[in-house]
């Protein structure tokens, strides 16, 4: 059956991990990052999110890319943990959030139907004192509303101070931001976090879904987890949907918000703009 979700094919050149492109020494890595910031080597890609029930675009996740030159692209799975380790993630994330707001403003001014855009926040970001003020001034600068920007809290945040995190999230929510818990079902993102932190949306980690096709136990756990999340009335987005059968399974479970290669790979802003032009 034809896949209706990806109007533009082959948008994404597979990224090399780029592990070798990064120096081992922290000082050299920091110098390289500073130069990359000056040379605008950090870019934003957007991955669409669809409502499988209505077949409509309902959002997109902004994912950072580091393009060192024409040939070399380093994967965020490699460089984000290094940025976190050397205390530079907040600086680089702020740059990405600003680019996302600027893109959204441009698209709104073009009269496009722009859904919410989700940005990623690392552990260090969430505990940063200036965070809320930064977002508030960013939204004012680009005349956006808090609900336009969803905040995805990545897994590394959950290992630190859960009580403080709940307070920060409460405060962000009181300002109107939509806060999402990323990677639920993996690593540190536990039931305790779910119980104690007032997230608006849960993003289900892709591993369970991907194992569900061959492993009956994984499928039963996936079904039970979705039922549990529906019971506590929290919105769920499933990541890593790569095939139609997976989308159908999720649809049968009543879980219609999906993101993954089946619907579209992360694409650069120009290609995402084309997707928005088709979003009526
Ligand atoms: P994440 O937030 O869990 O993002 C989802 C990852 O899964 C992305 O990898 C995305 O390209 C990939 N993905 C999407 N659909 C599929 C699929 O169907 N199958 C498979 N196998 N993978 C899929 P990416 O872009 O390499 O990012 C890796 C991680 O780096 C992210 O995981 C996130 O934790 C971090 N990251 C990316 N951008 C940022 C950012 O701007 N700031 C921060 N702090 N972290 C970021
Ligand atoms: Ca994410
Ligand atoms: Ca995730």
Image (cartoon, grey):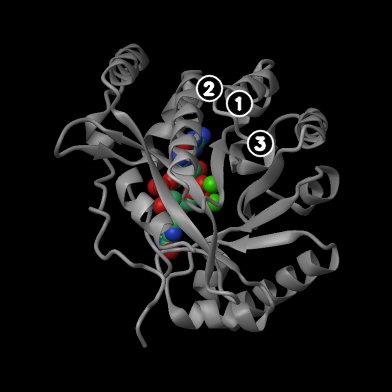
Whether the residue carrying mark 1 lies under 8 Å from ligand 1 is answered with yes
Q: Residue at x 45, y 24 (%)?
A: 95
Where is residue 89 drawn, in percent x and y?
Answer: 49, 24
Q: Quadrant of the N terminus?
A: bottom left
First in sequence: mark 2 vs mark 1: 2
Where is residue 236 drawn, in percent x and y?
Answer: 68, 62
The residue pinned by badge 1 equals 125
Q: CA distance from mark 2 to mark 1?
A: 5 Å
The residue pinned by badge 3 equals 145
Neighbourhood count class around disc 2 (C-alpha, 10 Å): few under 14, some 14–19, many 20 upward: some
Is any part of residue 214 visible from this angle? no
- Residue 180 drawn above or below residue 213: above
> Along the line of sight, which residue is nearer the eye, 181 or 266?
266
Q: Residue at x 80, y 42 (%)?
A: 197
Where is residue 215 drawn, in percent x and y?
Answer: 55, 80
Q: CA distance from mark 3 to mark 1?
A: 20 Å
């Amino acid at each position: 059956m034809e896949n209706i979700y990806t109007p533009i094919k082959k948008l994404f050149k597979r990224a090399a991990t780029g592990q070798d492109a990064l120096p081992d020494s922290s000082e050299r890595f920091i110098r390289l990052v500073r130069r990359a910031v000056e040379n605008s080597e950090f870019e934003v890609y957007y991955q669409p999110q669809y409502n499988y029930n209505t077949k409509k675009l309902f959002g997109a996740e902004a994912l950072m890319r580091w393009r060192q030159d024409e040939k070399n692209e380093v994967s965020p799975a490699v460089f984000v943990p290094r940025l976190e380790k050397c205390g530079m993630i907040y600086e680089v994330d702020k740059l990405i959030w600003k680019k996302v707001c600027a893109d959204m403003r441009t698209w709104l001014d073009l009269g496009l139907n722009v859904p919410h855009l989700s940005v990623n926040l690392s552990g260090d970001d969430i505990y940063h004192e200036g965070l809320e003020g930064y977002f508030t001034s960013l939204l004012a600068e680009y005349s956006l509303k808090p609900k336009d920007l969803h905040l995805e809290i990545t897994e590394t945040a959950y290992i630190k101070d859960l009580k403080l995190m709940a307070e920060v999230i409460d405060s962000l929510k009181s300002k109107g931001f939509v806060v999402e818990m990323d990677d639920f079902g993996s690593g540190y993102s536990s039931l305790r976090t779910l119980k104690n932190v007032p997230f608006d949306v849960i993003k289900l980690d892709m591993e369970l879904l991907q194992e569900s096709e061959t492993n009956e136990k994984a499928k039963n756990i996936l079904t039970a987890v979705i039922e549990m999340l529906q019971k506590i009335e929290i919105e769920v987005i499933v990541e890593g949907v790569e095939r139609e059968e997976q989308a159908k399974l999720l649809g049968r479970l009543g879980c219609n918000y999906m993101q993954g290669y089946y619907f579209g790979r992360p694409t650069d802003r120009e290609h995402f703009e084309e997707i928005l032009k088709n979003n009526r």
